[in-house]
Image (spheres, helix red, strand yellow):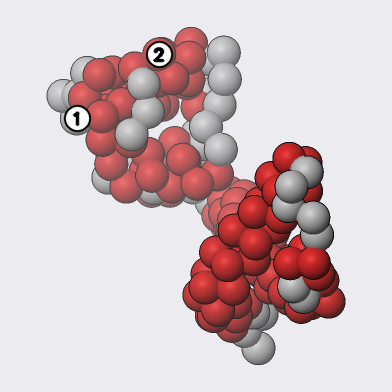
Amino acid sequence: MLKENIKSIRKSRGLSQEELAIKLNVVRQTISKWEQGLSVPDSEMLISISEVLETPVSTLLGENISESKVDDLKAISEKLEIINLQLSKRKESIRKFWHWTFISICLITIIIFIGISAIGNIYMEWDYNKTEYAVLGVAIHSFGWIFVRIAPIILIASIIGIVLTRKKV
């Protein structure tokens, strides 16, 4: 039912598959697959399609609001509730992912900083006449030098990320 509704509403609006695809930021083949029933759009895309086609999601899903009965309205509201629940779960999982990513970046930065501080300048006492020690010493010193200058920026950015992605009460 969804495939026929997308196709008929698209044609009634005078849009080609290519034009609809451009408005939805997808490729034309995606529209074709929806209209052939080979795939279905996710809940966010259903909302985008309804906005572009200026049609309620319930109509796309096969319900006709003007002719619906009380039971039909309940079914539509249940479908929309499910879609909203899926959207909120997806947004919450994305928020959690970024929140924990920022926490991890912050912790890794602190651990590396502590490691660099613990090592100190021990490499300065090495015998730099040996090539291996010279290369390793320069690499450690370069990493430490760069990291100490970049770490505050990384730390501040990750703290800002943690604050912005925290769960709002």
- What is the x, y in percent for residue 42? 56, 38
Helix, strand or loop status at disc 1:
loop
Question: How many residues crowd mark 2 within 10 Å: few (<14), some (14–19), many (20+)?
Answer: few
For marks 1 and 2 on the same chain, the one whose residue lies earlier in the sequence: 1
Q: Which residue is mark 2?
A: 29
Query: Between 133 and 84, which is closer to the camera in this rendering?
Result: 133
Question: Residue 123 or 71: which is nearer the viewer?
Answer: 123
Residue 34 screen position, x and y as percent = 48, 20
Q: CA–CA distance between discs 1 and 2? A: 19 Å
Q: Residue at x 28, y 41 (%)?
A: 52
Please state if 101 lies on the left or on the right of 122 as rendered: left
Q: Residue at the front extreme?
A: 129
Q: Residue furthest left?
A: 14
- Residue type pointed to by label 1: Arg
- Secondary structure found at label 2: helix
The location of residue 78, given as percent across then percent down, is 65, 55
Vertical order, 29 against 142 (above or below): above
For residue 13, above or below residue 116: above
Question: Residue beneath label 1, please?
Answer: 13
Which residue lies at the image location 50% right of the left edge and 27% below the top edge? 2
What amino acid is labelled 2 in the image? Answer: Gln
